[in-house]
Image (cartoon, rainbow, N blue to C red):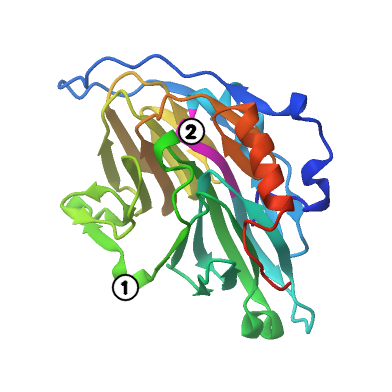
């Protein structure tokens, strides 16, 4: 959805223009002292751009130097801040396009989106729901504002992550996980500080419903003004926080709505203190530490595998899906 401008532009660049990242060295074993994680950088929201005619997003990873290495296993984060769409009879969204070698994770906070793919997956997500689509060996899909939402209009807020797959699973069969708000694990923060919804991973004994191919945590944290939340991840893991609402202090550094906080792989503890009611997307993941070669919506390990993806797509091996 959010990471693809148009299918036509997909093959506009040569393979020499693809993004390649070499594996990073394995980090040391987790530090048991729970030292505070060091912040790599706090990045303000980049300029918004339209994807299709239904998604007005900020692409955060595009402004982070060496993002493929620093954010492994995450490949992309497109955030659609709250925006009010007027009622329309026209279908807004993104038409049929391919993916191979990774997963797309779409989180709905306001509004609703309909999804269909060539493997038979599909459905509608609304506030609190998540779509977790594993493209793996290859899939076609499309995403649009849900029909009733389009007719009525209203506030829309979503985020989409692209999550890399390990080499061993890049050509696995596609799958689709429709995760409803009711399925999410929910952990209450101490001292009435708020709550954390768990999409993937575990927090304070609450587990998320998402099935992942590598260790990943994905958390929707709601921290009340004056409240506090702590997250502790192995220091070998990638960790980051997107501030979606409010003003907070994160490990003694100030951040506001729209800021993306990236941490170094040093230390474990992330402490969030809310100056006002805040909502944050917290993510962590164990780096895959494999070569990345990306060409538009294909993410593989070698240029030869990218060329094969292009051939397979052209020969219809990703299936068929009506626009």
Stretch of the chain drawn in magenta: 71-78
Residue under label 2:
261
Question: Residue 65 appears at what percent x and percent y?
Answer: 61, 22
Vertical position of residue 173 compared to residue 124: above or below: above
Question: Residue 13 appears at what percent x and percent y?
Answer: 82, 34
Few, some or many residues within 10 Å of mark 2 (<14, 14–19, 20+): many
Going 36% across and 28% down the picture, which residue do you hit?
A: 251
Q: Quadrant of the N terminus?
A: bottom right
Q: Nearer the viewer, mark 2 or mark 1?
A: 1
Residue under label 1:
182
Q: Secondary structure at mark 2?
A: strand
Residue 214 found in image quarter: top left
Give the prevailing secondary structure in the magenta stretch. strand
Q: Is residue 114 magenta?
A: no
Going 37% across and 21% down the picture, which residue do you hit?
A: 265
Looking at this view, is 169 or 314 the one in front?
314
Looking at this view, is 117 or 269 the one in front?
117
First along the sequence among labels 2 and 1: 1
Residue 276 seen in render? no
């Amino acid at each position: 959805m959010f990471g693809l401008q148009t299918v036509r532009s997909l093959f506009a660049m040569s393979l020499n223009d693809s993004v390649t990242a070499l594996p990073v060295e394995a980090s040391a074993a987790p530090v048991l002292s729970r030292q505070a994680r060091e912040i790599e950088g706090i990045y303000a929201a980049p300029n918004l751009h339209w994807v299709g005619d239904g998604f007005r997003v900020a692409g955060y990873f595009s402004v982070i130097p060496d993002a493929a290495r620093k954010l492994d296993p995450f490949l992309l984060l497109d955030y659609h801040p709250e925006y009010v769409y007027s009622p329309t009879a026209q279908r807004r969204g993104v038409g049929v396009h391919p993916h191979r070698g990774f997963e797309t994770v779409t989180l709905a906070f306001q509004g609703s989106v309909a999804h269909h793919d060539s493997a038979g997956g599909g459905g509608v997500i609304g506030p609190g729901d998540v779509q977790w689509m594993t493209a793996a060996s290859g899939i076609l899909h499309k995403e649009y504002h849900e029909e009733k939402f389009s007719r009525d209009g209203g506030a829309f807020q979503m985020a989409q992550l692209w999550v890399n797959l390990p080499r061993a699973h890049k050509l696995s069969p596609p799958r689709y996980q429709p995760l409803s708000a009711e399925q999410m694990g929910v952990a209450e923060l101490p001292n009435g500080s708020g709550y954390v919804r768990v999409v993937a991973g575990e927090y304070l004994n609450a587990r998320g419903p998402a099935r992942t191919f590598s260790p990943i945590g994905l958390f929707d944290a709601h921290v009340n003004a004056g409240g506090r939340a702590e997250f502790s991840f192995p220091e070998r893991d990638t960790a980051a926080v997107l501030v979606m609402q409010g003003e907070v202090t994160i490990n003694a550094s100030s951040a506001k709505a729209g800021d993306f906080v990236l941490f170094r792989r040093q230390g474990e503890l992330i402490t969030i203190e809310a100056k006002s009611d805040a909502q944050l997307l917290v993510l962590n993941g164990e780096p895959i530490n494999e070569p990345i070669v990306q060409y538009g919506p294909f993410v593989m390990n070698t240029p030869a595998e990218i060329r094969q993806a292009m051939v397979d797509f052209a020969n219809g091996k990703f299936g068929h899906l009506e626009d």
